[in-house]
Image: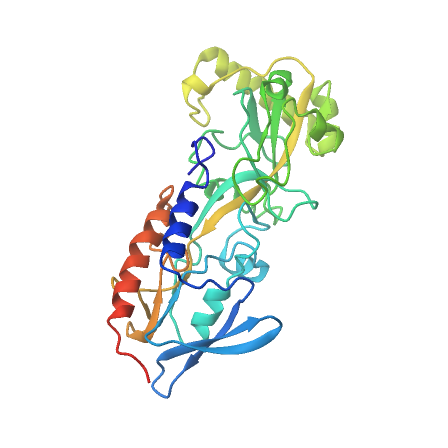
Amino acid sequence: TGPNSEDENAFWNFLRTRVESRNIAVWNRSPAKAFLTDSQGAVIGAIIQKEGKEKAVQAKKGIILTCGGFEFDEWMKMNYLKGYPYYSLGTPGNTGDGVRMAQQVGADLWHMSGVSTLLGFKVPEFEAAFMIRPASNRYIFVDQQGKRFASEFADIHAYNFLVDFFDPHSLRYPRIPCFLIGDEATRQAGPIGVTAIGYNRGRYAWSKDNEKEIRRGWIVADDTLAGLAQKTGLDRTMLEKTVDQYNQNCQRGEDVEFHRPQDKLAFLGPGPYYAVKLWPCLLNTQGGPRRNAKAQVLYPDGRPIPRLYSAGELGSLYGLLYQGAGNLGECLAFGRIAGREAAKESLRD
């Protein structure tokens, strides 16, 4: 299902065909707003917004929440995540609705600071961010002073741990944003931005030589590191020192500072040079209502909220560290568990 698979829609098409083969009705543009509960606290339905009107929908047995995370809810990101701002590669529809609805009926929350984060590129013209993946290894990441701070080949799901450093002296996050610094080989090797995955897929075609993005001002170019520093606000002396030190590491064949893999070490050549402003960008958030092994959503004291279930990244099992593609398997596994357990519930009149 990734950018290099033969059918990038295979997973979605698999689910869609299963829904269609069972004649399951799907209501698009019909967001749920709140739960309906009985006098015992059991969830017996939901209020939805359909065709401009609120409508009460009764549940015969139970309700299963599978409505994603809060990647596009600024209040939740500011309160639950360290560092700001965070952008997202995914759908703008992930606004934390499931978290708020579960809270309204007393659900406990867990893993609210758990995220999968890489470094990406964001411009106002697009709601979602772009993933960055240069085709050449001739680039480094630097902070707002022009100083390198990590291996550029760290785990792509865990860049939040590298950029959310808060400087107690300057009282700011010096790595949000940070910058990709590359040379002419980086530009010529292929698109720096990735448009094969994420919400922007099909919405923009990144040029093969990055020239279109340079003209748009998305990529900053200059013949010298000094000129690039002036255009980006980086410290000239620090940037030049950083590139020189990194090139010495390449010559030595060892990244003594951040242990970049030896086969990924590649010199930054003479100018021109290029810079791209980078931000922490979410693949997903993990937080939400806590659930048990039966997919039941829980009160803070551990009791199940009657007839309410959940699956997927909304209240994911993952906390501090995310396992790549884990939400897909988790959604399938707990979707089946939730469906099985909800089917055992007695029919309501």
Determine the image quadrant of residue 154. Answer: top left
Figure check: 153 above or below 101: above
Residue 145 visible (yes or no): no
Q: Which residue is at a point 49% across and 29% down the rendered structure image?
A: 152
9 vs 68, nearest the viewer = 9
* Residue nearest the observer in this picture, 192 or 335: 335
User: Residue 262: x, y in percent?
Assistant: 41, 18
Answer with left or right where residue 56 lies relative to residue 92. Answer: left
Which quadrant would residue 194 be assigned to in this image? top right
Q: Nearer the viewer, residue 341 or 150?
A: 341
Instruction: Tell me what residue is drawn at x 27 percent, y 60 percent.
Output: 337
Q: Position of residue 58 (x, y in %)?
A: 42, 78
Q: Quadrant of the C terminus?
A: bottom left
100 in relation to 284, above or below? below
Q: How many circles with numbers are drawn on the protein?
A: 0
Q: Is 71 drawn above or below residue 214 in the view shown?
A: below
The residue at 63%/23% (across/down) is: 208
Give the x, y percent position of residue 232: 71, 33
Q: Nearer the viewer, residue 217 or 174?
A: 217
